[in-house]
Amino acid sequence: MIPLLEAGVTLATTRGFDYLMKQGSKAQQAKHLLMPPKAEGKAELALAALAIAPQLVNVFGPSPVVERFWAMSLDQLYWLYKARPYLEGLSMAALAGLAYRQRTLKTGGKAMQVATQAIMALRFGAQMVSAPTAFAADAAGHLVVTSRELGRLLKPDDLVLGLYLNGEARCYPLEVLKRPHLLHDSVGGIPVVPTYCEHSHAAVAYRDEWRGERLELNVAASPNGNVAFYEGKSDGMIHQLEGAIGAGPNAGAILQTFPLAFTTWQAWRTLHPDTTGIWFEQGPAGGAVVAMMKGLEALDQRGRQPLFKVRGGVDPRLPAKEPVFGIRVKGRALAFTREHLRANPVQELELGGEPVVVLYDEQLDVAACYARTLGFKAARHGLAVAEDTSGRLWQVSGVPSDDRDADRLRPVAFAIDKVRWYAWSHFNPGTALAAPTKAVSVRA
């Protein structure tokens, strides 16, 4: 159905614009001099409005302009996204109708001209404000580079996202990932899709697989201040911080996730000297989008409240934009403030019935959470931050200090560092909070 509709849209567009070009010929101009065009009536005005209105919905529906004041639900976003080709077809059909009436009734063509110019202007604007258009996947792809090459490309304090899987460390510079919001990669033999949301500062890596096929993720919008993706293989809408398909025929299906370290290039390279990295050339086409994103970031920094509307408001226990370290196990969520982590760099907890340990390296400003099979206590020695009951020292990366090739601690799958509080609390209602003034049970 969709391919046939798109073919019809293409045909209508081609015929309509071809006719416009013919109208500009000398022969047609002479004809109009001999036979003056008829005045346009309500039908032409209605068709012009019908051509423009669907384009307005497609451009501004999933855009920062709307999200600033309306926090749409994921179901609403799903149906809005699915309606895009049909709205486009309706617009082109109205445009073709205008062209037909102009040719058969010999009307002046002003309505056709206005509608065409408006559509062209809207499509140009969509390159910046419409998320599905502005953040379309770049065909140029990306390159895997060595640690030495990254050292030439990055400054020590540049922010990066780090992923470690099956003995392989990978680094994703934030400036590289923030515009496309996602990249398809393979780390440690596992297909992954690291994602980043510049509004909520949330970073999540998904397993790049849906029932044996690679995911088809496309940025749809950022309702409630967190990026949402449309996934083509499952026909589902995914809110990044939910880690599951939230709308569509497969709603409720859980996606496998992996934790990403949110830190600086210098800190990541200290923990993983042999890391490789991803480099992605933005290219000139991304200039307008990058400028728009910088403008939104500047606007975001001016206020204490989220830039975009959050459904239900913000949890008042912390300032809306305060960064927290959030973990979720079997539906139970817990968030840690930086002050609490500095005061408690090693914490043994039970979350969702599972024993876990939270480690924090204040020097590198890196937090991580692992499944716990041993007892741990704080012990600072070199890069080590914890000591287990056998006397072995451990780094925040889950590596034993005496043997980097030994088995590492198993990370908790859904752990997000430096995510903004408003986003974490919205997508994890009822989350427990570990803060200097907020006590938290060890069995949260």
Image (tube, helix red, strand yellow):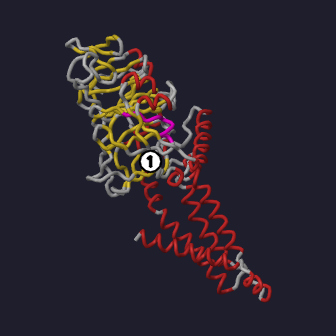
Mark 1 secondary-structure assignment: loop
* Total marks placed: 1
Residue 239 spot, x, y in % from top left: 41, 46
Q: Quadrant of the N terminus?
A: bottom left
Is residue 172 a member of the stretch shown in magenta?
A: yes
**Viewer-nearest residue: 372 or 426:** 372
The quarter of the picture where residue 295 lies is: top right
Residue at 42% over, 68% down: 2
Residue 88 spot, x, y in % from top left: 52, 66
Residue at 65% over, 84% down: 103
Residue at 54% over, 59% down: 58
Q: Is residue 33 above or below residue 383?
A: below
Q: Quadrant of the C terminus?
A: top left
In the image, which residues are magenta? Answer: 170-178
Residue 407 spot, x, y in % from top left: 22, 25
Residue closest to the far right = 33
Q: Amino acid at mark 1?
A: Gly
**Viewer-nearest residue: 153 or 369:** 153
Number of residues whose C-alpha sits closer than 10 Å to that of mark 1, classed few (under 14), some (14–19) or many (20 or more): few
Instruction: Answer yes or no: is residue 129 visible.
Output: yes
Residue 185 spot, x, y in % from top left: 36, 43
Q: Is residue 227 left or right of residue 442?
A: right
Q: Is residue 130 left or right of residue 442?
A: right
Residue at 60% over, 39% down: 294
**Viewer-nearest residue: 288 or 125:** 288
Q: Which residue is mark 1?
A: 141
